[in-house]
Image (spheres, grey):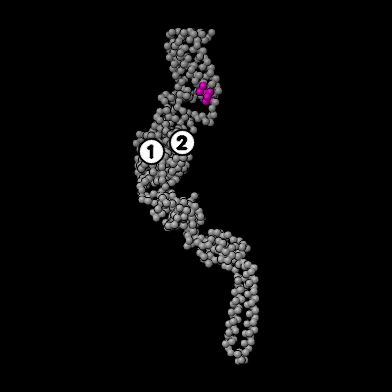
Amino acid sequence: MFPFGFFRAFGGSRFSARVAAAGIAGALLLASSMPGAQAHEGHDHGSGETIAGALAPRVAARSDIFDLVGILRGDRLVIYLDRAATNEPVTTADIAVTIGDAADPVNTEWGADGTYALTSPQFKTAGPIELVFSITGDAGEDLLAGTLTVPGEAAAAPGGSTIGTLRTWLTSLVSPMWQMVLLAIATAGLALYGTYFLLRRYFAQATAFALMAVAGGGLLFETARGAGSDPAVRPAASGATIIDSPRRQPDGHAFVPKPTQRLLDVRTEQLAPQTAQRAVSLIGRIIADPNSTSLVQSINGGRVMAPDGGLPRIGQAVRKGDLLARIEPTLPQADRTTILEKLGEVEQLIAVAEARLRRIRALVEKAVAPQSQLVDAEAEMEGLRKRRQVLLEIRVEPEALRAQTSGVIAAARVVPGQVVQAQDVLFQVVDPKSLWVEALVYGEIDPAGLGHATATVSGRPPLKLRFQGFSHALQQHASIVQFVVEDPPPNLGIGLPVNVIATSGEPVTALIVPKDAVVRSANGEAILWRHEAPELFEPRPVRTAPFDATRVIIAAGAAKGDRVVIRASDLVNQVR
């Protein structure tokens, strides 16, 4: 048979060393071309990796003035320049870049989105490239250096380009299914020939073909596993899909690319000790200024009557003395009877007095009676008419309710025709520009030692307060402290609960940050996000103490000089 005749031709001892060497070399060649022998996507098996996953090649540099990040897209390098202390974008600088050993630097171009761009054919060459950035402008002058590593199979391992090119060429000739068929046939043939050499006691040749059969089996397994996976999630080794998105590292650090930082408007601050007074938190509520508010009530009660312009509505502006409503008095039946009897008596007296006045006037005209009798009769008549007028007004004259202060209607609790009782609060008039805060202070705090204060309301800007005074009489084991709200917003309501932060005690020196900078981690502890690198943030557990409505004192967990996130820290905390 042909195979056995073929093996007799070269199976002698003269060819055994050459065949063994060729077999071992072929096995090593096949093993080196296996996908499992190469580095996985997005990992560097050399130096320790810091960011897992597929990222665009980048260069980063930092100084006391600037943070610089360059992201490579093809042969175009996009540069992001920020202030190191605040992470604020610098968009008006001039950047000159020296690439490698080039003698002359290359000027970057300004971008409409606040970035700088540089295009060079050297960025197409795989391997590390040394870059030197010369920065000038209003924000300062600086010189930064960094290394940009351009990915490529040539940089992965020596001689890898030849094997990769050959493997890519072979892969392009046949489909994955035919690759598995051919690998299966080749593996079976190698195993058969290895068995033949083993039976003939050609151990060197048998070992070589056994190694090649094992390598072929490995290639068959890797090819079958790759063909069965989802092509959408199996990028090629030389053209991986770049996913430049925020992610949380295994050690808890958050990687946030510079484009995302610009989108989230991330801002930082370098911690430095500040001298300030400690603050206490009080429970309070908004009240009206007693000198600028009024309650409109009826003295006697009765039926509500609307004025000509109608009853005032809530929020309507009124002036002092404006008519708000009329109250028609309601009298008991006994009182009505008494008034009618009195009115009847007065009417009768008026009739008698009129008849007597007519007689006296006629006698005076004839000079029979003196003039004094006429004067007395007229005075008596005038008094009776006034008594009748008083009785008539008691029956029909309504009570007028007028505003006692200028402001707006804060409460209106009447409708036309409603019967109200005496001293019922019908309207409340307040001045929205004159409001106070009333807070409760318990025994462990000296009310006389309270100083600068602010109040926080959910969903509203903080309110600046001015200390007004406190009561020496306890109410429910607490002292009442009142503050004046300076420049209150127009939509602030009476009775709204607030949280008052007031300074108290001796000044202290501590690290003070905005309250929004402190967020809660997954286990509930308070943390600060430290800006460790231009695109890397480290969570720092901290202990805080209240300072005012917008800031807190960092009692432990952070040190002077740390750059921490003070804006959008909650968004950085959500990176997973």
The one nearer the camera, 510 or 339, is: 339
Instruction: Give the overall secondary structure of the magenta segment.
Output: helix
Disc 2 marks a residue whose amino acid type is Arg
At a point 50% along the width and 19% down the height, the residue shown is 217
At a point 59% along the width and 77% down the height, the residue shown is 386
Q: Secondary structure at mark 1?
A: strand
Q: Which mark is residue 540?
A: none
The one nearer the camera, 474 or 293, is: 474
Is residue 556 on the magenta stretch? no
Residue pointed to by mark 2? 248
Is there any visible trace of residue 194 in the rendered image?
Answer: yes
Is there any visible trace of residue 268 in the rendered image?
Answer: no
- The image shows residue 231 at horizontal and vertical percentages of 53, 29
At a point 39% along the width and 49% down the height, the residue shown is 278
**Magenta-drawn segment:** 221-227
From this view, report whether residue 162 is shown above or below residue 305. Answer: above
At a point 63% along the width and 72% down the height, the residue shown is 338
The one nearer the camera, 459 or 415, is: 415
In which quarter of the view is residue 96 placed? Answer: top left
Disc 1 marks a residue whose amino acid type is Ala
- The image shows residue 203 at horizontal and vertical percentages of 45, 10
Q: Secondary structure at mark 2?
A: strand
Residue pointed to by mark 1? 61
